[in-house]
Each structure stands twice: as structure tokens, then as C-alpha cells.
Image (spheres, rainbow, N blue to C red):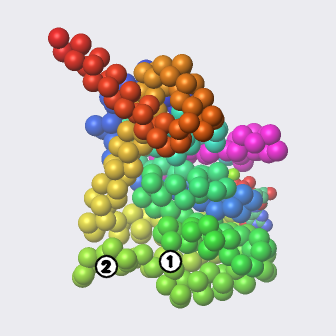
Amino acid sequence: LTLVENGTPAGQSALAELFPRTGQAHVVGFTGSTGAGKSTLVNKVAREIRDRGDELAVIAVDPTSPFSGGALLGDRLRMRELVNDPGVFIRSMASRGHPGGVAHATRDLVTVLDGLGFPVILVETVGAGQAQVEVAQVAHTVVLVEAPGMGDDIQALKAGLLEIADVIVVNKADRPEAQQTLRALQAARLGGLAVEDADRDAGEASWETPILKASALEGWGIDALVDAVAAHRDYLRASPRWDALRTRHARAEVEAWLMRHLRTWVDTQLDPARIDAAVATVAARDCDPASAARDLLEVLVHHIKTSAEQEGA
Ligand SMILES: Nc1nc2c(ncn2[C@@H]2O[C@H](COP(=O)(O)OP(=O)(O)O)[C@@H](O)[C@H]2O)c(=O)[nH]1
Ligand SMILES: [Mg+2]
């Protein structure tokens, strides 16, 4: 996993070897703001899935920001109930410093765990920015975790998270303010925001995103949440959506790798002196940046072409 996460050649060949065995796992992403209770909830959900008899893996992406340096340890502590269970595999992952970005690294870890035969993989995203939305590129089922008292305008509305949510859960429902959050979310759904049927074929059953209540702290509502996640998986599998998701995920993966290979080419095949020279012409206003970059690209393509010809000769 470390070799894969760091994008090493050994990791890449492991991925290639495992890939044919993947595509079986149900990948469930948990997204939502920091502090909503994702880690606590994922822990309880993992416990419940285990109690129902499935083995599972958990990937927790934690902020590496110096302002929240304790997060990794905190999440590990919360996971404590699970770590002694050999049927559960838990992997914490840094949210920064991956060659292809955090979404890419997450997907690669999912590939490994899927290839190793875990039937369920839970992914907890870092609760900020783009990473919250990107989980939809790897998960079959996206659980949006909301919590009361995080401002009465629903944060997720702004972040575009309601559109990607397959299941919404208002966590911390032990607090009375949860009722208000629930109503706000229901109103947003009535507005049509969370009903996923835009690209649905006529006659195909639609999925109405359920809005649930739970208290991860007190341990209730978990059962219904796991039921909803399983129902969504069954819905996907019974419709062409499972295959459509597979294609969508495959496209995202191929595109991500394409960009990554390009990046590697730029880093290894372009003479840094040439880049410096291009930068100098742009700084001196002798050339505009887009044209300078296009010229470099032509040099790169030419270089790759000639080295391929040399190899062929
Ligand atoms: N009252 C209440 N607090 C909770 C609940 N779930 C989590 N918390 C608390 O909320 C804080 C943040 O939880 P955490 O799981 O780290 O949130 P994350 O940042 O989304 O992973 C912790 O202090 C938890 O104990 C809940 O259901 N009710
Ligand atoms: Mg967390």
C-alpha cells in the first residue's frame, strides 16, 4: 500500500497485477465538513457491517495541515474498537504529498483492497474543498454526513455535495437543533436538488436520496444507515447504473493516469534549461506564456517521437 500510495514503479506494477481482480467491492464514500462526525460514524458503520458478517476495509484521509496535526492519531484512537478485529483493515492516508493528488492515491488504495477481495470499502474524505466532491469518482455510494449547528444555510448546498449524495445522514441527532437541519435538507431535496435522475433511462427505477438521522456518539440510527447503503448497492446492481458507474470510474482513472504520465514526461524528457529559457522570454515579455508552453510541448512531442524511432530502428 505504501509503494502504491507513493506512486513507485513497484507500486504501479502491483496495481497492474491486481487490476484484473478488481471491480467486485462496494465502495462507500463518506463526505461532509470537518467535525460533522464522519470518523465516529464510519467507525460505527464498520462495526455494524462486521456484525452483519462482511469483512471490510476502511480508508481514512486525514488533513496533514499543521493546524490539525493530531487528527491522524485521533481517528486511530476512535478506530480502536475495530483494530483488533482481523476482518477489518484500516488504512490512514495523508491528504497531501501524493504524486497524482489525493483522489488518485485514494483510488489506487481502493484498487489494492478491492483486488485483495474486501467486499466493502469505506472511504472517509478529508472535510474540505474539492476532495469532498472527488470521492464520487471512486465511490459507488456517497454518504453525505451533515451535523446541526454548522450554520443554518446548509454548507453542502454551496459545496455541490447534495447533488452527489446517494444517502444523507444528519449526524449528532442527539442534539435538538438537528431537527432544523433535517427540515432544511428536506426542503432542499423538495427543490429537486438531491434527486438523481438527470441521466436516467425511461422506465428505469429512480433512487430517491434518503435523509436519515443518527447519533454516532450514542450509537443509534446506524442500522438504518447501513440498510440504506445496502439498498443503494442493490439498486445500482439491479440497474444499468452499476455498469455506467464502472465506465465513469474507468474514464476518470484513465484520464488521471494520462495526465500523470504526461506530467512524468514533462519532468523527465524536457530539458530544464529549455524551460528556463522559455520562462526568461515570457518574463521579458518577448513571448506570451501560452505560446511558450505550446512551443515546449512541440519540443517534447518531437523528442518522444525521435526516441521512439530510435528504439524502433
Ligand atoms: N453530540 C454528538 N457528537 C458527536 C457525534 N458524532 C461525533 N461527535 C463528536 O464530534 C466531533 C468530531 O467528530 P469526528 O468524527 O472527528 O468528525 P469528522 O471530522 O467529520 O471526522 C468529536 O468530538 C465527536 O466526538 C454525535 O452523534 N453526537
Ligand atoms: Mg475524521
Q: Which residue is mark 1?
A: 194
| Residue sitting nearer the eye, 146 or 202 | 202
Residue 312 lies in quadrant:
top left
Q: Position of 17 compared to 161: left or right?
A: left
On-image quarter of the C terminus = top left
| Residue sitting nearer the eye, 127 or 268 | 268
Examine the rendered structure and indicate whether residue 291 appears above or below residue 187: above
Residue 175: image location, x then y, percent: 79, 75
Residue 170: image location, x then y, percent: 65, 73
Which amino acid, by three-letter code, is at mark 1? Ala
Q: Which residues are magenta?
A: 51-78
Which amino acid, by three-letter code, is at mark 2? Ala
Which label is found at residue 84?
none
Q: Residue at x 79, y 80 (%)?
A: 176
| Residue sitting nearer the eye, 63 or 119 | 63
| Residue sitting nearer the eye, 77 or 306 | 306
Alpha-carbon neighbours of circle 1 within 10 Å: few (<14), some, or many (≥20)?
A: many
